[in-house]
Image: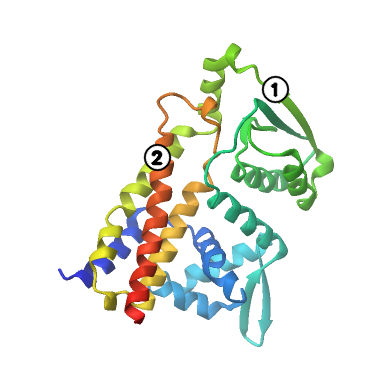
Amino acid sequence: MNQMSKLDAFIQQAVTAMPISGTSLIASLYGDALLQRGGEVWLGSVAALLEGLGFGERFVRTALFRLNKEEWLDVVRIGRRSFYRLSDKGLRLTRRAEHKIYRASAPEWDGTWLLLLSEGLEKNVLADVKKQLLWQGFGALAPSLLASPSQKLADVQSLLHEAGVAENVICFEAHSPLALSRAALRSRVEECWHLTEQNEMYEAFIALFRPLLPLLRDCDPSELTPDRCFQIQLLLIHFYRRVVLKDPLLPEELLPAHWGRANRPPAVYQYLSTRESRRAGVRQRER
């Protein structure tokens, strides 16, 4: 097997390694590539971009329809063609995701908790707001009670106002005397923030992309065609984004002793090193 086919084999392996959501993949595509290039794209162009990864037009149509229905994308129809771009809501969510994805580490913690109690929200509205808050590092202590040790009240209030639910969410601040309840609190945190699942996601990301860096370093620059580079970059940011957005970035004081927080720095390093190696190969190819 030559080096070129090894790159193709890796791409195919990554696509089939775990289920890929169409809406999540296209969100990654808009956030990482399309937004910086105008942001409005014909449906047929999106389908052409994803065809090389084995995703058909029906897959793309269904995902774009759902993102439009969720008000994440706006659609403009010109004749028989549909052009999709990020809505105001989609842009806000993308910017928040970027901030978390590229955040270096968990913030310092002074023992303060932010608690949110929702009242009278419709089921669908509650689910959407809860999803956004979970992305920001909140955990569900109870069905209508969310908590975060790291979020600032002003940032959360801005999110609630944008979602139109500020009048239906009660905000509290509390202080935890950690020395008096360390074991019980860590046990509760592990359960409510699904830390075991998060750790497994980091391990899976590291294992999946570990072979890629040597392949990029050893391959001939001519093998880094635009199509291959696009596919590798999209898969890399998609899987990395999926893991990091679910990481609550909890303070070290709250993490169980056996939980592998050490998995996050290697995942970040692997993402950045692989991205830079691909770019270096492209620059060498263009000389």
Mark 2 in CB contact with mark 1 (< 8 angstroms): no
Q: How is the image coloured?
A: rainbow
Q: Nearer the viewer, residue 42 or 125?
A: 42
Q: Is residue 223 shown left or right of residue 266?
A: left
Q: Which mark is residue 263?
A: 2
Amino acid type of the residue tagged 2 in the rendering: Asn
At x 40%, y 47%, the residue is 267
Is any atom of residue 148 visible in this view? Answer: yes
Q: How many neighbours does mark 2 have within 10 angstroms: few (below 14), some (14-19), or many (20 or more)?
A: some
At x 35%, y 64%, the residue is 277
Q: How many neighbours does mark 1 have within 10 angstroms: few (below 14), some (14-19), or many (20 or more)?
A: few
At x 66%, y 61%, the residue is 90
Which residue in the protein does label 1 denote? 175
Q: Which quarter of the figure is the N terminus placed in?
A: bottom left
Q: Give the quarter of the image for residue 250.
A: top right
Location of residue 262 in the rendering, given as x and y in whole percent from the top left corner: 40, 36
Q: Which quarter of the figure is the C terminus placed in?
A: bottom left
**115 lies above or below 270:** above
- Looking at this view, name the residue that lies furthest to the bottom: 79
- Looking at this view, name the residue that lies furthest to the right: 167
Q: Is residue 105 shown left or right of residue 273?
A: right
Location of residue 254 in the rendering, given as x and y in whole percent from the top left corner: 54, 26
Location of residue 108 in the rendering, given as x and y in whole percent from the top left corner: 60, 34
At x 67%, y 62%, the residue is 91
Q: Give the quarter of the image for residue 156.
A: top right
CA separation, marks 2 and 1? 29 Å
